[in-house]
Amino acid sequence: MTNPQDLIGHFSGGRVLDVATGSGAFIHFLLEGLKGYTEIIGIDTSERAAAPFAEAFKDNPRIRFEPMDATLMQFPDASFDTVCISNSLHHFDHPEAVLSEMLRVLRPGGHFILSEMYRDRQTETQMTHVLLHHWWAAVDRACGIVHHDTYSREQLVGMFTGLGLENPVVHHLSDTEDDPKQPENLTGLESVIDRYIQRAEGHPDLQARGEVLRQRMHHIGFHGAASLLAIGTKTG
Ligand SMILES: C[S@@+](CC[C@H](N)C(=O)[O-])C[C@H]1O[C@@H](n2cnc3c(N)ncnc32)[C@H](O)[C@@H]1O
C-alpha cells in the first residue's frame, strides 16, 4: 500500500478545505500524509455527516465541519492554501461547478488535490467494488439522491488536466495485496448489502441486482477499486 507521506508529504497544507467531506475519511489521509497544516475545514450538505465528523475529530480543535453547498461556497476568493475533494465528484450533477468553486477559494500557488476511484482498468476483485458502488448509486437514485456511476480514468484525468494547474502530478493507486475473501471485510460488506436491499424496497429489480453482487463478492472476492490521486498548484 502506498504511504500517504510519499504522495503529499512534500508540502505543508496550511489552511485546508476538504470538500464534500462526509464523515471526514479523507482528512485521516491528510493527517497521515501532509508535512503539517494550520487548520482543516470539512464542508458537506449532509446533516447526517456532521455528528460522525465531530466524533472523529473531537480531540482536535484545528479540524471542524461546516454545513455548506460545494457549488456555492461562502468563503472569500483565495482563502485556502490547499483544497481537496475525495470520492465525491460523481455525487454531483455538475462536477465542473464544484471544481471551479474550489479553484476560486484556493490562493495562487496553493495545492489542489483530487482523489477519486474510477470504473475501468480494475482487476476482477476490484471490479466487485465498482459494480457494488454502481448498484449503491442506483439505489440512491431510486431514493431521490444524486449519485452517478463513477467516471473512467480518462474522464478524471481530463477533468484534472482541464484545471490548468502548474506542476501536475497524477498517481494511480491500486492495492490488491490483502486476501480478497478476508472474512471481516466480507462480513462488513454483507451488512452494507443488507442495508441497501432494505432501502431498495419497492424495486425488486434493484434488490435482485444486490443479491447477484452478494454472490459475486463471495465467489470472486473484493478489493478496493483503483483510484486517481492528482495534485497540482494554482497558477499566478
Ligand atoms: C462519498 S461521500 C464523501 C466521501 C469522503 N470525501 C471520503 O473521501 O470518504 C460524498 C459526499 O458528497 C456530499 N455532497 C453531495 N452533494 C454535495 C453538495 N452540493 N455540497 C457539499 N457536499 C455534497 C454528500 O453529502 C456526501 O457526504
Image (cartoon, helix red, strand yellow):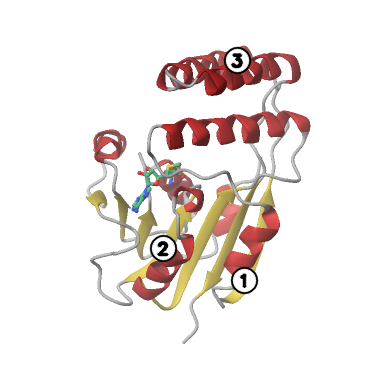
For badge 1, the amino acid type reads Thr
Q: Secondary structure at mark 1?
A: helix
Residue at mark 1 = 161
| Numbered disc in front, either 3 or 2 | 3
Q: Nearer the viewer, residue 103 or 55?
A: 103
Residue 67 location in percent, x, y?
A: 23, 50
Q: Does the rendering let one see residue 29?
A: yes
Which residue does the numbered mark 3 point to in the structure image? 211
Which badge, 1 or 3, comes first in the chain's sequence? 1
Q: Is mark 2 within 8 Å of ligand 1?
A: yes
Describe residue 71's horizontal placement relative to residue 184 as left or right: left
| N-term mark: 3 or 2 | 2
Residue highlighted by disc 2: 98
Question: Which residue appears at 64% of the width and 47% of the height?
Answer: 118
Q: Image point 59% across, 55% down: which residue?
A: 229
Q: Work out whether residue 58 or residue 136 is closer to the camera in this orientation and state it.
A: 136
Callout 1 crowding tier (Cα within 10 Å): few <14, some 14–19, many ≥20: some
Name the secondary structure under disc 2: helix
